Image (cartoon, coloured by chain):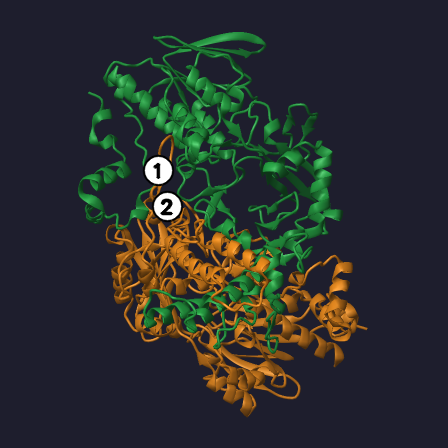
Chain colours: A green, B orange
């Protein structure tokens, strides 16, 4: 008997969830206490129980063949996990390299966008930027593979108060580069002042006791760095006009911006970018490039991954799956027991197949988002040398949207920063430009924040994900209606074919979505095989 | 003529400050624009112009001898900078090692606290904790030496929303470990809701236009993640009861805490710890231990640093300085032209000297703060493995105050976390215990947050800075009156003797204070020598 029906196949999370349904949350809490898991925060997405290593052998089921379409993170995960359990996997990848959107642009990288010219990276050795995913939250399953493959990780500086806000056409602060620390200190200061006074003057009808009011005011005093009279008069948190130093150099705190100016600037609306569950510090990335994860998978998969092998047809019968692809200019065919298809829906919709009509319709109608990035190589790391800014980003309402400073190789001689990471209409605007026009636009707008651009720039490489062959989009977009409708269809196996990828998850645009969805398919196929 | 009087001796900051005094801030801004320095944020503390390398030789002033007392960061900086300019420096250090409070505790470290037993570190190879400074803001001069000495740096995870708050005796949330993200989401949610409604209902008399009010409400809506009716009903920012995952696993957001419970918990008062100018992300530390900086200085200073050489007497005349010290059990004497004394005032007050009476009184009366740390080595990194917590800290109102998770060597097998970093009365309480009692107390209290303490603990090493020989205190404390009085005296040279150290700065308890004050003395001595 396989272990697939054994309790150990339940993840810790599922187990606790079951206990919860039976005994309520108190039962869960008490049980967790007994298990040494004192808080719900220890229940994380990583609870995946892989197929038993000997299940196939012990049950005489060896030789099961799985065809995996696409060597992105979902395809690689599926092949790796199924391979560990003894399945014979073949991964067909259309591109000349594995990884999908996990793609680190380095010296010698080439790319030809759909309808565009060929682009050659002139980046220096050991320099790179991640064209796709570039950061990993601590709780994403992605880190499990970093650990498993012994890939060293380092923090991704997703928050840096030395970064800047720069907005145009927003009133008095238009066209000024303002440190994030200055904007945060002032907005938090003024807002805390307003509420503290309102609470103190009982202008608000709050359902709290006088003692609780006192605690609230004390919180606001700290939150805003208010003075004894609950006024915000500036704060060292926002930085100094004259830095404190030795002897009599006590430092002079900067003057706060005017309340109206800071309100009009819109800078406050940027703060919550840092609050998102998947954007909060700490975040991480592999030392040496996100594609270290791809290399980690590849090391284990060897020649089971066939590159330059675009799929041309997907068919299935009651007995198995048949996939046609081209390799070395030859049309080839492969058959298997099951198929895991991780091809982006934007590409899959153009491949002849015999999916059910509801599946075909869902694949056809899925909408993909736009996103684009440009890596700009500079002669020297002026952001570190001149501005003492080590990683992090600057945000702007210009087309370039954001600049990311490299969160690695500090003190290095040269550096590549992300000159833009644009989405939506901004990405389309930039993506519709030629490579050289994108470069010029990124330099012109970025130079408003960093005049050093003008003298230190060396070369660039840009990506528009809608124009990347075999991707044709950045990530899928579902609205609530689509989630309730066509998305459900995509999540169901179509006979012997299972879809996987971040588009089959609620962690869209993250590698963890690809990993978790691949693992779900692995589990399903294994259960089906063991039950058959 | 030396370059000491040339304009290039002025730092960029001083230069701009002078322009400001003459022409006002607009002149500064315009000048900065011309210099390519678009914002005041580019004026940083690092603007130090070292003595000209050939000043002494060109002016026939070679052979000037400087006696430096103490091989902490101030003493090492002074010796290094003066050495580059051709001065003959001797550094006398009482301890068997250089660095002062920059002290990384490693395998084999031993220490005997004043009035205590000898302690031997049993830490594993390659593990360490920094007993003194452990983090560096981006804008501190400390990073300049990391760069100069080719010391790789890595981020110090000073903010991690996966860390916990744990308070006792604070109402409904007493004794519960709450993630920082949960507390932040709820406090920001409720507070934003209160103010948004007050603004919307015109309950506040604000000097802003209706359009600005709209912007304020929009900011609050984002800040608190409020719903369309401006209510806070929980937010994914605070985490999930059930994590989002693949397919239909959309995730279930945790329920917010009750407003009263979160107010009473006091958790909100912790948030502003992260807002301080010198606590904001990003922060850094040298790879391999803070003492890499000490080793960097030592490499350049060689045998100019005399270890195990406690000073026993400090005398000066019109011609020079004479310092007595013991080394190899022998009383020895050294003479020099000038002396830089970086010995902590808590120690200096007990060394016979002929300082002026006002200087003696200032040295005598300086008050020193308490601080203590314990490093706890664990068999495995349960905070990473079980709780997906990579660096950062947890805060509590228990004696241990805070736990810091190692911001390095992620995925390592074993790990040392800071079991407490206590100051003030908490530090005194812990410091007055024996090493084994401190360990027990740290384990008992810490186990309330991490029950894994009970099974995974291996060994510890603790420090009470008031009991560390030749330190006798964590850092100096000046109130406003003392800054206006005795501190001024300490900043003035006493004839041929100059004090340096973070206690002669407004960056107390930071290495940058030591560095900046040492550089100020270097500059003064050089000017005096060149004028003589």
Instruction: Report crowding for label 1: few under 14, some 14 to 19, many 20 or more residues within 10 A (C-alpha).
Output: many
Q: Is residue B10 visible?
A: no
Tag 2, which chain?
B
Give how far across and how far down residue B115 sits, in percent.
32, 75
Residue furthest out toward the right: B1
B309 or B200: nearer the viewer: B200
Nearer-the-camera pick, B120 or B168: B168
Number of the label disc, if any, that sits on residue B388: 2
The spot of residue B262 in percent (x, y) is 34, 60
Image-quadrant location for residue B521? bottom right
Question: Residue B365, image x and y in percent?
Answer: 47, 86
State whether residue B199 is above or below residue A244: above
Task: Let me know if marks 1 and 2 both belong to one chain.
Answer: no
Q: Which residue is mark 1?
A: A46
Q: Quadrant of the C terminus of chain B?
A: bottom right
- Answer whether labels 1 and 2 touch (C-beta < 8 Å): yes
Report which quarter residue A400 is drawn in: top right
């Amino acid at each position: 008997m396989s272990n697939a029906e054994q309790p150990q196949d339940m993840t810790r999370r599922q187990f606790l969830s079951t206990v919860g349904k039976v005994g309520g949350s108190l039962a869960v809490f008490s049980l967790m206490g007994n298990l040494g898991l004192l808080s719900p925060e220890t229940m994380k997405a990583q609870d995946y129980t892989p197929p038993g290593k000997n299940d196939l052998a012990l049950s005489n089921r060896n030789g099961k063949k799985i065809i995996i379409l696409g060597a992105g993170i979902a395809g690689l995960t599926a092949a790796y996990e199924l391979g560990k359990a003894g399945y014979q996997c073949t991964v067909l990848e259309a591109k000349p390299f594995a990884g999908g959107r996990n793609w680190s642009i380095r010296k010698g990288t080439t790319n030809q966008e759909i309808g565009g010219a060929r682009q050659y990276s002139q980046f220096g050795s050991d320099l790179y930027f991640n064209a796709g995913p570039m950061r990993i939250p601590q709780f994403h399953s992605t880190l499990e593979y970093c650990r498993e493959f012994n890939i060293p990780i380092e923090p991704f500086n997703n928050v840096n108060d030395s970064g800047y806000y720069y907005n145009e056409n927003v009133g008095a602060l238009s066209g000024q580069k303002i440190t994030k620390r200055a904007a945060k200190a002032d907005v938090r200061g003024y807002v805390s002042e307003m509420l503290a006074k309102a609470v103190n003057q009982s202008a608000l009808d709050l359902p709290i006791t006088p003692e609780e009011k006192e605690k609230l005011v004390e919180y606001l005093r700290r939150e805003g760095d208010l003075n004894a009279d609950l006024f915000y008069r500036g704060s060292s948190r926002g930085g100094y006009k004259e830095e404190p130093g030795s002897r009599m150099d006590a430092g002079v705190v900067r003057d706060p911006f005017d309340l109206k100016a800071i309100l009009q600037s819109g800078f406050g609306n940027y703060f919550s970018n840092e609050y998102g569950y998947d954007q909060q510090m700490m975040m991480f990335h592999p030392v040496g490039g996100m594609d270290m994860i791809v290399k980690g998978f590849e090391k284990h998969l060897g020649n089971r991954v066939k590159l330059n092998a675009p799929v041309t047809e997907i068919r299935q019968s009651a007995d198995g799956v048949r996939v046609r692809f081209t390799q070395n200019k030859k049309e080839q065919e492969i058959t298997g027991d099951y198929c895991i298809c991780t091809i982006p829906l934007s590409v899959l919709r153009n491949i002849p197949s015999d999916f059910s009509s509801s599946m075909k319709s869902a694949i056809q109608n899925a909408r993909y988002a736009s996103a684009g990035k440009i890596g700009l190589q500079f002669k020297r790391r002026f952001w570190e040398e001149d501005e003492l800014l080590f990683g992090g980003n600057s945000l702007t309402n210009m087309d370039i949207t954001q600049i990311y400073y490299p969160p690695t190789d500090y003190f290095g001689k040269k550096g590549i920063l992300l000159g833009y990471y644009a989405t939506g209409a901004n990405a389309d605007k930039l993506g519709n430009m030629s490579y050289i026009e994108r470069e010029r636009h990124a330099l012109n707008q970025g130079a408003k924040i960093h005049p050093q651009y003008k003298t230190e720039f060396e070369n660039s490489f840009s990506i528009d994900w809608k124009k990347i062959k075999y991707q044709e989009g950045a990530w899928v977009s579902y609205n609530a209606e689509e989630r309730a409708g066509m998305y459900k269809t995509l999540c169901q196996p179509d006979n012997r074919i299972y879809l996987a990828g971040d588009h089959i998850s609620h962690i869209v645009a993250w590698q963890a979505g690809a990993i978790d969805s691949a693992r779900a398919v692995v589990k399903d196929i294994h259960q089906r095989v063991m039950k058959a």
